[in-house]
Image (cartoon, rainbow, N blue to C red):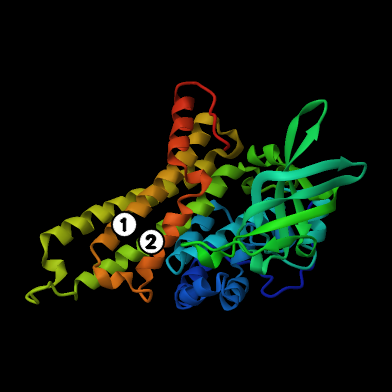
Amino acid sequence: PKETIRTVHLRGSTLVSSDELVERARSLVPLMTENAAEAERERKPADVVIEALREARVFDLMVPKIHGGLELDLDTFLEVGLALAEGDASMAWVTSFYIEHNWMLCQFPASFQETLYRDRAHVLAPASLATTGRVEALADGYRLNGRWQWATGWPHAEWVIAGALLHSPDERPRPLFLALPREDVEFEDTWWTDGMRATGSHDIIIRDQVIPQDRAVSIQAMSSGKAPGAQLHSHPLYRTPMPPILGLAAAMPAVGQARAALRRFVGEVGTRKTYDGRRTQADRASVQQRIGRLTLLLDEAESLLRSVTREVMAIRDLAGPEQRTRWLASTARAVHKSREVLALVAEASGASAHFESHPLQRAVRDVNTLSAHTVFDLDQRLEDYGRTVLGLEPRGLF
């Protein structure tokens, strides 16, 4: 593609290295931790945290340099996501999806990208990927109607990405992603949940909106690494299939929270006394065994994500069905291992961990909730992987 140089008028338009961005993410963990309880009560991300993430340029991570972004790859995405997840699962979830959704917007046609990123290096855009909308082809665009759930990050939305099926009498329905500015989208306050409450993942409603042609892209093309962005941008990041990026974005908050909970538990048992007051919890063989088991479980979860990240970066759009289904099964397994770590930490943490002031109770609720995401349906992910090992076609959505 023809590369052009543009002057980008935004804060900190100079490049930030991978290592520096990871350090910036780590430095934000105390702020995220401090605001986590209030964000949960308010059922939305804290404004001060969103602004700090903007200033740190975390949302610019996957945006091409030509648009003023950092153009960093999945290995940086993983390290940033795991670091932020130690502060708060909900905020890490919102952040990882805001980052991924910018990658998605950079898969749309060039004319839309140029308009969208003309004066900014990121957009805060919830995306509802289920194709529950109804889209009609027009002479110069599309007409979109529908209702979608799970619009993560709606309270700070600037744009929205919605999935819909385009029906044609001559061919099978074609799934599309369509992009709309926030003002063209309504929302309904539906996000009353027992976990991940601070994500603000409300329902969105779109009524009779006309969408220009360059604000639509094939879901199949994006899922196979062959959307317009793969031709427009030379970095191999933009020919990466979407599903493993989605899997990593959704898995990192679980693994990071398990890591933070285990570290806190190890610190607490060193000072917490047994009931008779004669020794610390750390002196008990059962506690020592539990910590050994939990450390190995967490190592396995992290290793799965790191292995997936390495393989995706090495193979990208050349991966076959067996590799792709293994990637998603691995991320699902990492989340289930992380959930097990949190459950076992909670089991050994005593009644005090159930006070609302203790972060462990929120971590358990958050990870239980996020593990219900359809991408972490472990039975389905393992069935898909097993079928491909046997040379059969996978049946799952991804």
Left/right of residue 69 with respect to residue 25 in the rendered view: right
Q: Nearer the viewer, residue 351 or 223?
A: 351
Residue 338 in the image, given as x and y percentages of width and height: 37, 53
Residue 114 in the image, given as x and y percentages of width and height: 81, 57
Residue 354 in the image, given as x and y percentages of width and height: 32, 69
Residue 99 in the image, given as x and y percentages of width and height: 61, 59
* Circle 1 residues within 10 Å: few <14, some 14–19, many ≥20: many
Hey, which residue is sitting farthest right in the picture?
139
Report if the CB atoms under discs 2 and 1 are less than 8 Å apart. Answer: yes
Q: Can you tell which quarter of the image residue 159 is in?
A: bottom right
Q: Is residue 140 above or below residue 122?
A: above
Q: Is residue 98 visible?
A: yes
Q: Residue at x 48, y 66 (%)?
A: 84
Q: Give the SS element for disc 1.
A: helix
Q: Give the SS element for disc 2.
A: helix
Left/right of residue 127 with respect to residue 270 in the rendered view: right
Q: Quadrant of the C terminus?
A: top right
Hey, which residue is sitting farthest top in the picture?
391
Nearest to N terminus: mark 2 or mark 1:
1
Q: Nearer the viewer, residue 15 or 348?
A: 348
* Circle 2 residues within 10 Å: few <14, some 14–19, many ≥20: many
User: What residue did someone put label 2 on?
Assistant: 364
Left/right of residue 339 with respect to residue 394 in the rendered view: left
Q: Can you tell which quarter of the image residue 118 is in?
A: bottom right
Q: Amino acid at mark 1?
A: Ala
Q: Is residue 51 above or below residue 236?
A: below
Q: Residue at x 64, y 63 (%)?
A: 60
Q: From mark 2 to mark 1, how far is it between C-alphas?
A: 7 Å
User: What residue did someone put label 1 on?
Assistant: 343
Q: Residue at x 69, y 57 (%)?
A: 204
Q: Amino acid at mark 2?
A: Val
Q: Nearer the viewer, residue 228 or 387?
A: 387
